[in-house]
Image (tube, grey):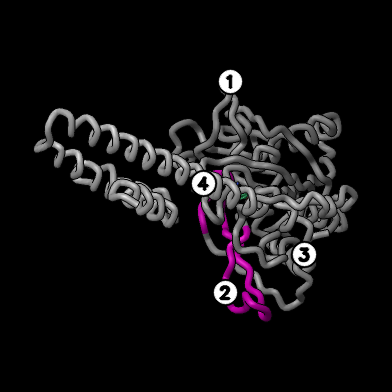
Amino acid sequence: MNELDTLVESARQSFAQALTPADLENAKALFLGKSGRLTELMKGMAALSVEGKKTRGAAINSAKQAIEAALNESRQALADAELQAQLKAEALDVTLPGRSANAGGGLHPVSLTLERVEQIFGSMGFEVAQGPEIETDWFNFTALNTPEDHPARSMHDTFYVEGGHLLRTHTSPMQIRHAVQHVKRYKNQLDAGQGMPEIRVIAPGRTYRVDSDATHSPMFHQCEGLWIGENVSFKDLKVVVTDFCRTFFESDDLILRFRPSFFPFTEPSAEIDIQFQSGPLAGRWLEVGGSGQVHPSVVRNMGLDPEHFIGFAFGMGMDRFTMLRYGVNDLRLFFDGDVRFLSQFQ
Ligand code: DAH
């Protein structure tokens, strides 16, 4: 074997040993690069006669072609191997059984909570009212004693839609909507000075705010409660809310705290905190809603005389209730639509 054949052979071997495209390009440089072995041989031709250059040049050229052919072969081999490896890694076993199409559906955990809340308040004589999620400024804010430029509006940044409408930031507008209907229904009786049946209603539903993290979602659920009559007191509110929470969480030793707070539509106002006496959350105060005596201006916006009618209202976070009941620590799980999470509630 002459010197050129040996060179071609050693190039072929080192190309064949390359395991990656980068290895191969390094090996190529050793033979075909600027200071590669073949290039060195070409430089050596300078000293030869014209005749010598011809034969030597032809021989070197054919060695170069042989090396390039070996290089392309190895490139192709590496590309083939990579494709095979990829096909193997992404292989689908088409003989595996499919996902069962008849895994029965079920109610979302928050829907389970809402059903439960309606059932419990229903047993205490509360009606259930539904209202629009696209609200007017009047019902969502102004009628609730929160006029334009009131600082409390800044905590209720929301999504504004066409025609001055907005996505309701709480279920409180339902206080006004429902009370106005009620007052209309008993107008004759009221005009005749005969009073009216008490308003006792809850209004569960979707609400919206520009908030998003582990405990806030831009869409969330609240349940509003309203109790208006001629003889209702804060004590009634406390009894109803306490009874409700104990029944909901099936825990007789659950304790509640009404912590003084501020809402424009109630005066006085209180934050509702609960505390479990046993279980993983025992001993911690957990805020679950707001409440208070309905502000006289709000009673007036309901079409009632605040000198004769007094009312109490509350609003509770239904997602929070669901998280506490089932021990869920990230609100976003409720809205991801992951069947593995949702099927646990069936
Ligand atoms: N609407 C209030 C909120 O979303 C919650 C609330 C507080 C509702 C006090 C009430 C109430 O009915 O009396 O932050």
Mark 4 C-beta to ligand 1 under 8 Å: no
User: Which mark is drawn over residue 248?
Assistant: 3
Return the disc, 4 or 2, that comes first in the chain's sequence.
Answer: 4
Number of residues whose C-alpha sits closer than 10 Å to that of mark 1, classed few (under 14), some (14–19) or many (20 or more): few
Q: Nearer the viewer, residue 178 or 253?
A: 253
Give the residue number, with chain letter if any, for mark 1: 162
Give the residue number, with chain letter if any, for mark 2: 284
Q: Nearer the viewer, residue 328 or 115?
A: 328
Numbered marks: total: 4
Q: Rounded to the nearest whole Å, what is the CA distance between mark 1 and mark 3?
A: 39 Å
Question: Is residue 123 toward the left or the right of residue 12 in the image?
Answer: right
Question: At which x and y percent is residue 206?
Answer: 68, 42
Question: At which x and y percent is residue 288?
Answer: 62, 60
The three-letter amino acid code for the residue at tag 2 is Arg
> Range of the magenta residues?
261-288
Q: Is residue 45 magenta?
A: no
Question: At which x and y percent is residue 228?
Answer: 74, 47
Return the disc, 1 or 3, that comes first in the chain's sequence.
Answer: 1
Give yes or no for contact between labels 1 and 3 (Cβ–Cβ under 8 Å): no
| Observer able to see residue 231 | no
Number of residues whose C-alpha sits closer than 10 Å to that of mark 4, classed few (under 14), some (14–19) or many (20 or more): few
The three-letter amino acid code for the residue at tag 1 is Glu
Q: Is residue 128 above or below residue 233?
A: above
Q: Disc 1 vs disc 4: which is toward the camera?
A: 4
Of helix, strand and loop, which one carries label 4? helix
